[in-house]
Image (cartoon, rainbow, N blue to C red):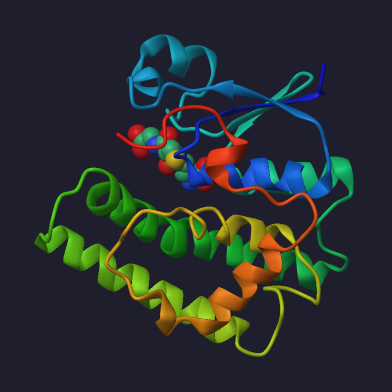
Amino acid sequence: MPDFKLHCFALSGNAYKAALFFALAGIEWESIFVDYLGGETRTEQWRETINEQGEAPVLEHGETKISQSGVILDYLSEVTGRFGAQTAEERREIMRWILFDNHKFTSYYATLRFIYGLQKSGETPVVEFLRLRAKAAYAIVDGHLADRAFMVGDRLTIADLSLAGYVFMPEETGIDHSAYPAIAAWKDRISNMPGWRHPYDLMPGPTSL
Ligand SMILES: N[C@@H](CCC(=O)N[C@@H](CS)C(=O)NCC(=O)O)C(=O)O
């Protein structure tokens, strides 16, 4: 029985960040399917017993139970010794990109992808706003990656894993990804690593609404 249990579902790029950590580290883990589309995370019982914040992913490891993908990634790097910082400066730099990812890069893109790509909203002012914000975040990450292979240092860290949450999701967002060649090259570097698997292949549950 694996030590690590991850409450997750296939459509969740936030959960993929942790699932990808396990895949690339070659660490056994168990998935616990979250019926997000069925409303499980909104039930009182789920919030009382799994996560009061009402969000997936949630990691269980022995007595430890934590949510927030950035905290989960930080915890996993600490307890496994993989993909973490080697210096205090790197630790700050990793945290800086994880916070940027949570606030901007993942947040706007994931919401755009959900509304436009999965719910098929069509063009609306909200979609237009989210796309503009997502493109601005993509441009910043693309600029950072223009002259380096990974976000921090010269190797894959949890900063990359955080930003990689939604970039392999296949849904249409109306964003022209050819405008971000450094992100495309970084994605190739990650997907060519031993152990890499697509989110829909790594986590349980439906892959459409
Ligand atoms: N900042 C959180 C975001 C988690 C998140 O938004 N998860 C989605 C699923 S991918 C969720 O459970 N959303 C529930 C909601 O917003 O009500 C993280 O990085 O873990």
Q: Position of residue 101 (x, y in %)?
A: 51, 61
Which image quadrant for residue 31? top right
Q: Position of residue 175 (x, y in %)?
A: 32, 71
Q: Position of residue 186 (x, y in %)?
A: 63, 73
Name the residue at 38% across, 53% down.
110
Q: State the residue in front, 91 or 5.
A: 5
Q: Position of residue 185 (x, y in %)?
A: 61, 77
Which image quadrant for residue 192? bottom right
Q: Residue furthest bottom?
A: 147
Q: Is residue 1 above or below residue 155?
A: above
Quarter occupied by the N terminus: top right
Name the residue at 52% across, 81% down.
142
From the viewer's perspective, is 169 left or right of 78? left
Q: Is residue 188 above or below residue 3?
A: below
Q: Is residue 189 above or below residue 161?
A: below
Q: Quadrant of ligand 1?
A: top left
The answer to whether residue 55 is seen in the rendering is yes
Name the residue at 34% across, 21% down.
42
Number of on-image labels? 0
Name the residue at 38% across, 12% down.
44
Quarter occupied by the C terminus: top left
Q: Residue furthest top?
A: 45
Q: Residue furthest left?
A: 124
From the viewer's perspective, is 191 left or right of 134? right
The answer to whether residue 15 is seen in the rendering is no
